[in-house]
Image: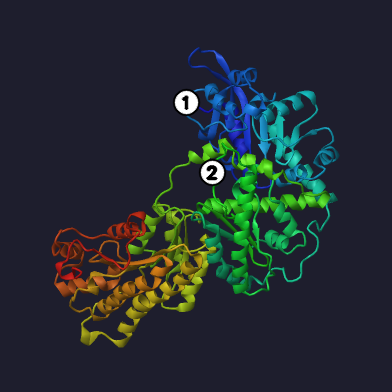
Amino acid sequence: MTNPAAAELIARSNRLGADPKNTNYAGGNTSAKGTETDPVTGEPVELLWVKGSGGDLGTLTEQGLAVLRLDRLQALQGVYPGVDREDEMVAAFDYCLHGKGGAAPSIDTAMHGLVDAAHVDHLHPDSGIAIATAADGEQLTATVFGDKVVWVPWRRPGFQLGLDIAAIKAANPQAVGCILGGHGITAWGDTSDEAEANSLWIIDTAAAYLAEHGDPQPFGGVRPGFEALPEVERCERAAALAPTIRGIASHDKPMVGHFTDADVVLDFLASEKAPALAALGTSCPDHFLRTKVKPLLLDLPATAAADEQIARLHELHAEYRADYQAYYDAHATADSPAIRGADPLIVLVPGVGMFSYGANKQTARVAGEFYVNAINVMRGAESVSTYSPISDAEKFRIEYWALEEAKLQRMPKPKTHQGRIAFVTGAASGIGKAIATRLAAEGACVVVADLDLEKAQAAAAELGTADVAIGVAANVADAAAVQAALDEAVLAFGGIDLVVNNAGLSLSKPLLETTEADWNLQHDVMAKGSFLVSKAAARVLIDQKLGGDVIYISSKNSVFAGPNNIAYSATKADQAHQVRLLAVELGEHGVRVNGINPDGVVRGSGIFASGWGANRAATYGVEEEDLGQFYANRTILKREVVPENVADAVYVLTGPELSRTTGLHIPVDSGVAAAFLR
């Protein structure tokens, strides 16, 4: 049974974390103190429940809490070796834990345990950080809050900060919380409701002051030519630039992207102060750990040509990498972790929007959300003062903190396809759906492309949230529709790495019954459709400069001469030769092109369910329900082929094991001797 104090803490945390005005995703921490019976002694024991490392307040559960013995935690003050060795105290928290399980204690645990209050909240609200990052933040704190909130000069999170806040609370019994310079807020209360009310009072009071006293144009006037482009033009330009920008962000390691053209971003980018403020970077540790110390800002107007912008982005990328290397070299010590990459995580394009990047879609999206937080902070600080973030030296101390490095090393090993973005046609059912499912399970972001948008979206929803998969409409026989689908994919995830030409249909007829319309339909969808998808995707793959994979789901019929199948088999042969041709042409760009030749995928197949199965069964003189076994019986292995077998082949071809393979066709047919490749 959950302890009442812990239950109140979870409920309070969820309420606070549900509103972005209170704190950013996974930012801040909350705690409660209470009593439980020690199972060893049977005596009551004072405990601290505190949100553990890496958790999110809005979704916090009991498993996300660290539980510590309060007497042991407070006793650490007697062995504290001083601020120069305060990192050692994090390991000591493990000796204060009560029971087993739960989350790892965070660096802020001392703040919660040492402050003499039953309930403590540490949050990162935009309004509070605006005061915390103002050049005259200490005076503003007194002006805005009187003596109810106390200013704490910047100090890196840790044991000493906990001691500092505990001392401030003891010296200021009238206070309900603190503004932490350059960082955020901390509030407390004797009850959970009181702590929550005090947190919200600080947040709302700061916001009200900024609204009443702030300059309505804190970022100055608008730079001519840097205003937002019209929406349609803006999205077209974003899609045109996205592959290049993703390549820039992925120079050191592959990244997934996110794009936003929210008004708050566009207004900032159009302003006079945007270049100077962007160069100052973010301040709150949670912000710059996700966004890097500063973004890359394109210094051309929105009216510049796309080619001109692309050329300038490459120049700015070289400058950014040199600048970041200089930042690392200036502050690194002999025991600093190695540089983690010098590419930007935030790229700002005036008139278009913001591109943000991370190891996966959620991380990329959250990075963008954090930079929006940073814009809000800059607006607030500039409206009443001057934005003054912590120094680069202090940012480096946190970015390359040994404790931060240890947290990164504890992260699970990425799956084989993490960081890869797959575009699968005909993926709402059958083989395509099985492929999309397998790739998503291996860590890829997946675009489920299908003629039926509703079915595509439903299939994507089965794979997970929009951070995992999206559904798009794609009539592969229409060049404009194909381009629109790929543009949507690029804006959703930043680019494309892996294309699967799976969309298909079939009409089983002998030569004399096959009409010109039958022929054209099958060639339009499979031969022409694969060509159109590959052509549009190749532009993205080439601009990214990250290599990639193109897979054709062909058929054993591309080499096997079966009866009553002229149009289908001919178009499959066309697809098979496209594999060879594109493998040669795209190889210089690091793009591998391979094919898969399935046979008789009856179970779960959209093609067989649409009448093809009945026709083939009639051709071979068997019942339709026996067709799968009929195909299996004529193979060498005597085993039926199902969609998941084809998905397995796609996984292998696009994984790390066959990185030197291109132009290959893999049979997935249980062994059809007549279809052996020669």
Q: Secondary structure at mark 1?
A: loop
What x and y, as percent, mark residue 574?
30, 77
Binning the other alpha carbons within 10 Å of mark 2 as few (below 14), some (14 to 19) or many (20 upward) gives few
Residue 355 seen in the current view: yes
Q: CA distance from mark 2 to mark 1?
A: 34 Å
Query: Which label belongs to residue 190?
Result: none
Name above or below for residue 40 compared with residue 471. above
The colour style of the image is rainbow
Residue at which label 1 appears = 100
What x and y, as percent, mark residue 61?
53, 36
- Mark 2 or 1, nearer chain start: 1
What x and y, as percent, mark residue 114?
66, 24
Name above or below for residue 23 compared with residue 322. above
Name above or below for residue 131 compared with residue 250. above
Front: mark 2 or 1 = 2
Name above or below for residue 197 compared with residue 573. above
What residue do we see at 14% from left, 72% from top? 621
Q: Secondary structure at mark 2?
A: loop
Viewer-side residue, 11 vs 149: 149
What x and y, as percent, mark residue 299?
69, 65
Amino acid found under the numbered disc labelled 1: Lys
Task: Report the number of numbered marks.
Answer: 2
What residue do we see at 63% from left, 34% from top? 30
Query: Which label belongs to residue 338?
Result: 2
In the rendered structure, the answer to whether residue 69 lies left or right of residue 151 reads left
In the rendered structure, the answer to whether residue 89 lies left or right of residue 392 reads left
In the rendered structure, the answer to whether residue 562 lies left or right of residue 251 reads left
Amino acid found under the numbered disc labelled 2: Ala
Quarter of the image that includes the C terminus: bottom left
Quarter where residue 534 is shown? bottom left
Viewer-side residue, 304 vs 214: 304
Binning the other alpha carbons within 10 Å of mark 1 as few (below 14), some (14 to 19) or many (20 upward) gives few
